[in-house]
Image (tube, grey):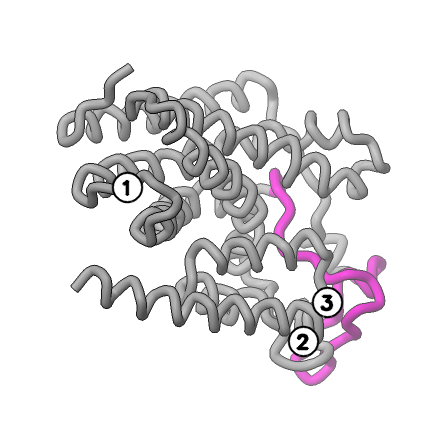
Amino acid sequence: MLNGAMLVWFIFAAISVVFVVWDSITNAPTSWVQRMAWILVVVYTGVVGLILYLLTCRRPFPGAHDAFTWATWKQSVNSEMHCLAGDATGIVIAASIVPIFGLTNGWDATIEYIAGFICGLFIFQALMMRGMYQGSYLKAVRKTFFAETVSMNMVMGGMIPTMVILASLWPGSEEPTNATFWFRMSLATIVGGIIAYPINYYLVKNHLKHGCMTLPGRDGPAPHLGHCSLESHPTDKNHKEHGMKMRTLPLSIAITWVACTLIFLLFTILITNQFVPLRF
């Protein structure tokens, strides 16, 4: 039964990836970073990622992208894709390599966390988004460190239990040459994305993290929807009131948030340990 479910999953995942790649080339008025994030997320989450893409990011027709993605919950989903794509990529790469060393599952999870954080922060956040910070890589690292850290902790709070528990149920799923490995990582990514969504919603709603932004000149106004493109009309009243100007939390509050998400991560590890012992 598992083999049949995986076959269906991978077929629909392949179709989903092809569609999102095609749509990203022909229809998306967003940055290449946003498009790449969605493609990677759909690679990892298959049809689940495609459904989210259709609901929250895909332009329904020219001129409607800003209006379509305006809702905070949609902005939050798009924002989370940056984190999820980077974190999951680092975790998948690490999980593909660690079996070579024959480490215990506790060390495997630790290395995967570090790899996810490095890929998420230093590549997918800072490196790819440095254009938003006057081209300064170090400034991009500083500005995205808080959001990436709290989001990453929540992603891993969902992924670690899923990966570890499923690995114990599916012998051989630790090997990247086994189809169950990729199915297991897909399920873990989906769970991680669900768990991390509330913190991303908070970050976007409070202007602590960017949402989905339309590139200037790539999508005009949508007068029939009573809405003008924020990027195309920077002097618009709505832009002044609801634009993407970012805030910064006081250091004490930021540290508290990081500590709380870390405690949540440790709590999920303790719960996981009750079912599958983590050994170092």
Q: Which circle's residue, 3 or 2, is located before the other in the chain?
A: 3
How many tags in the picture? 3
Measure the C-alpha gap from mark 1 to mark 2: 38 Å
Q: Residue at x 28, y 41 (%)?
A: 162
**Quadrant housing residue 157:** top left
Q: Secondary structure at mark 2?
A: loop
Q: Residue at x 56, y 34 (%)?
A: 148
**Quadrant housing residue 270:** top left
User: x%, y% of residue 45?
Assistant: 42, 57
Tag 2 residue: 64
Specify the amino acid type for callout 2. Answer: Ala
Q: Quadrant of the N terminus?
A: bottom left
Tag 3 residue: 29
Badge 2: few (under 14), some or many (20 or more) residues near its Cα, within 10 Å? many
280 vs 3: above or below: above
User: x%, y% of residue 278?
Assistant: 24, 22
Q: Which circle's residue, 1 or 3, is located before the other in the chain?
A: 3
User: x%, y% of residue 84?
Assistant: 50, 45
**Which region is colored magenta?**
207-236
Q: Indicate which disc residue 162 carries.
A: 1
Specify the amino acid type for callout 1. Answer: Thr
Measure the C-alpha gap from mark 3 to mark 2: 10 Å
Q: Is residue 34 left or right of residue 229?
A: left
Q: Secondary structure at mark 3?
A: loop
Q: Which circle's residue, 1 or 2, is located before the other in the chain?
A: 2
Evaluate whether residue 194 shows in this view: no
Q: Is residue 165 left or right of residue 83?
A: left
Labels 1 & 2 near each other (Cβ < 8 A): no
Q: Nearer the viewer, residue 19 or 126?
A: 19
